[in-house]
Amino acid sequence: MTSAKRLVRLDMWLDPIFDQLVAEQPNVELTITPTREVDATLSALRGAHGYLVSVAKDELPPRLFVTADLIAQCPDLVCVSTTGAGYDTVDVAACTAAGVAVVNQAGGNADSVAEHTFALLLAVRRRIVESHQRLRHDSGFTREHLMGHQIRGNTIGFIGLGQIGSRAARIAQGFGMRVLAHDPYLPPESLRALGAEPVSLDDLLAQSDIVSLHCPLSAETRGMMSAAAFARMKPGAVFITTARGGVHDEAALYDALQSGHLAGAGLDVWKQEPPGNDAPLLQLPNVVGTYHTAGVTHEARRNVARSAAEQLLAMLAGQRPPHLVNPQAWPAALERIDRLA
């Protein structure tokens, strides 16, 4: 009889579809370990073939990140799946060197994140949170005290036009907006096919009434939205991000808003998540903040859990998954998987 393939996941909230799909496979064993009992989890991982790892970097104990040290402790580990589109908690280079295949769930929450982009934008431009708070706590003001701006006719610039950015671009077209895009990984004709005008980053910053981030956090993008970048944005422009904390400099953004150079910001991601209640940006009336919830809808979480289960099960069966983060590692990973049979 073929020995069982072993999967490990933490007890963090996960749509039930993941466990259901795994349970349907007679030759796969799933172990669910307590997130805060790190030693117990590491003990389970030492015999695991697959690991579903959270992408919530500030909620996951650092020793459970997929690092070279963890991989060295887990000689049977052949595949890792994240619980979202990101992979901040995975050292992809270390996985590749060890022949461990890594997958993410690109696109699983894309519709939800794209929708959230416009929830933030409309909340900022129409002063929705400010209006709500004044209705609750104030009196003697007029509607004109809360006058906002429409977004129709504005120019919106997307930095990154992948799964999420391309959906957000379609929504922008529905609002009657001019769409610019900068994405160094897509040719100009691909950007045009998505309804966007390809431009350089400098031109996007200079021309856009709204700048919206949809790029991953990497060595290339870390700190990309710096004081200099905010200074290049149009006076009175709005900054929106549903990307990753660390791509924008929070102190520089605060200065750009406090000085009046920028008119507002909608922020779903933070350097530390959640930010403290006393975070300077949260004290500004023209900032709307959310707790990295753009992709946290029932629909998106179900899509992501289903995708993660299907990809882990596919890899353990020797089938190439659709969302490999490190495709160059697949031949070595497949060789290791074949030896499990």
Image (tube, rainbow, N blue to C red):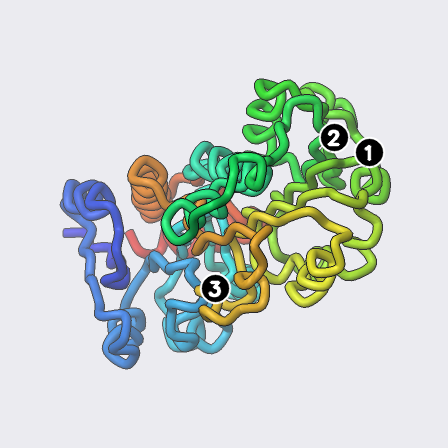
Label drawn at residue 180: 2
- Mark 2 surroundings: few (<14), some (14-19) or many (≥20) residues within 10 A: many
Q: Residue at x 53, y 49 (%)?
A: 325
* Earlier-in-chain disc, 3 versus 2: 3
Left or right of 20: which side holds 285? Answer: right
Which quadrant of the structure image shows residue 3? bottom left
> Residue 323 versus residue 174: which sits nearer the camera?
174
The outermost residue toward the bottom is 39
- Which residue is tagged 3? 89
The answer to whether any part of residue 24 appears in the image is yes
Amino acid at dot 3: Thr
Give the number of the mark in front: 1 or 3: 1
Q: Position of residue 111 (x, y in %)?
A: 45, 32
Amino acid at dot 1: Val
Q: Secondary structure at mark 3?
A: loop
Q: Is residue 177 above or below residue 55?
A: above
Give the number of the mark in front: 3 or 2: 2
Q: Residue at x 83, y 58 (%)?
A: 228
Amino acid at dot 2: Leu
